[in-house]
Image: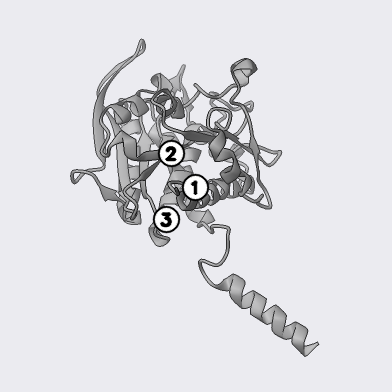
């Protein structure tokens, strides 16, 4: 009995030591706080070029600074001209910060912060699409700031996704690091509304070498990882072209896109914080960080 107690105590001690657990731990309250702020009515749906979009920029930039992300050329802002059939924005803005690694190679983590704004007097807050991805990006940055990565991690909050993936295109046309050094894009778009506990990782059809890394990600109590939504024969269920990762894919950069399946609140005024599954979402964000841990460790090995 005493021997059993000693073994239990030793096990508890090991699991309590930071860095020995395989699963990342994030600050759930901060994650939900970031989500709620970005999805507030005061931001007016964050349409590119609007005051609400500018408010989101300022909030994300402040959080980058608090986390301790380093800027390129002394600024997080990457400005670009955005033009669509609906609007022209002379100064749309991506926000870019990084955590230096040791290898000289990079992994780019992306999530778009813009949404569709207001329509017919109703605010489309875009809580899931895609304040959820941005809040998870901030959580990942916080984790890796405390746990130094092997590769340099570049965190990019993208503008102009809803108007044709234009922020991702602008980022890739003005890279802060050589394209040849980019090992992977991890894109997050819609992580917080799902009642089946299912988060999808899309992209292994095009990037089969990444499948073993995803298979090493263990389920969380409220969320499990499924692979799929990336085969051409799936039509609209093929997510290859449906978010910012497509711009990376077009340029031959491997990607994994994390997201949930469509739900009744997608691109509706009801995509509000009140509909977030607050048990599922933190675990979904944690699954992405767990994958990033594996990818950072394994990628680039000869």
State the residue position of label 1.
295
In the rendered view, does 162 fall on the left or right side of 83?
right
In the rendered view, does 72 fall on the left or right side of 248? left
**Counting residues from the N terminus, which is met first, the one under dot 3 or under dot 2?**
3
**Residue 206 horizontal side relative to residue 137, left or right:** right
Residue 45, given in percent of the width and then of the height, sits at 43, 29
For residue 173, which quarter of the picture?
Answer: top left
Checking the image for residue 184, the label placed there is 2
Contact (Cβ within 8 Å) of mark 3 with mark 2: no
Residue located at (47% from left, 50% from top): 33
Q: Quadrant of the N terminus?
A: bottom right
- Residue 251 visible (yes or no): yes
**Disc nearest the viewer among 3 and 2:** 2
Name the residue carrying label 3.
144
Query: Residue 271 appears at what percent x and percent y?
Result: 55, 31
Determine crowd level at label 1: few under 14, some 14-19, many 20+ residues with C-alpha closer than 10 A.
many
Measured Cα–Cα span from mark 3 to mark 2: 16 Å
Q: Nearer the viewer, residue 277 or 82?
A: 82
Question: Could you give the CA–CA distance between mark 1 and mark 2, rounded to whole angstroms?
Answer: 9 Å
Give how far across and how far down residue 75 sits, in percent.
21, 43
**Please, which residue is most extreme toward the top here?**
85
* Nearer to the camera, 92 or 269: 92
**Secondary element type, mark 3:** helix
| Closer to the camera in the image, 219 or 104 | 104
- Whether the residues at callouts 1 and 2 have beta carbons within 8 Å, the answer is yes
Local secondary structure at mark 1: helix
Q: Residues within 10 Å of mark 3 (few under 14, many from 20)?
A: some
Residue at position x 55%, y 24% in the image: 239
Disc nearer the start of the sequence (1/3): 3
Compared with residue 75, is residue 86 higher up or lower down, i.e. above or below?
A: above
Between marks 1 and 3, how big is the CA–CA gap? 13 Å
């Amino acid at each position: 009995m005493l021997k059993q107690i000693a073994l239990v105590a030793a096990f508890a001690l090991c699991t309590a030591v930071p860095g020995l657990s395989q699963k990342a731990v994030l600050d759930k309250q901060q994650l939900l706080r970031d989500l709620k702020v970005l999805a507030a009515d005061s931001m007016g749906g964050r349409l590119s070029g609007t005051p609400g979009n500018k408010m989101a920029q300022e909030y994300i930039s402040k959080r980058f600074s608090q986390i301790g992300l380093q800027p390129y050329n002394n600024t997080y802002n990457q400005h670009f001209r955005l033009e669509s059939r609906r609007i022209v924005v002379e100064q749309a803005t991506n926000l870019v910060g990084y955590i230096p690694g040791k290898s000289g190679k990079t992994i780019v983590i992306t999530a778009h912060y813009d949404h569709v704004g207001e329509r017919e007097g109703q605010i489309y807050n875009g809580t899931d699409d895609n304040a959820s991805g941005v809040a998870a990006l901030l959580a990942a940055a916080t984790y890796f700031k405390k746990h130094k990565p092997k590769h340099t991690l570049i965190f990019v909050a993208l503008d102009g996704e809803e108007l044709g993936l234009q922020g991702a295109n602008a980022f890739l046309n003005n890279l802060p690091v050589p394209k040849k050094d980019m090992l992977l894009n991890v894109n997050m778009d819609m992580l917080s509304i799902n009642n089946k506990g299912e988060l999808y990782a899309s992209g292994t059809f095009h990037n089969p070498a990444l499948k073993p890394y995803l298979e090493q990600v263990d389920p969380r109590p409220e969320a499990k990882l499924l692979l799929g939504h990336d085969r051409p024969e799936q039509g609209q269920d093929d997510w290859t072209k449906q978010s910012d990762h497509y711009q990376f894919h077009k340029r031959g950069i491997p990607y994994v896109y994390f997201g949930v399946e469509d739900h009744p609140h997608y691109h509706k005024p009801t995509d509000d914080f009140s509909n977030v599954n607050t048990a599922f979402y933190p675990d979904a964000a944690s699954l992405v960080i767990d994958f990033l841990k594996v990818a950072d460790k394994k990628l680039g090995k000869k």
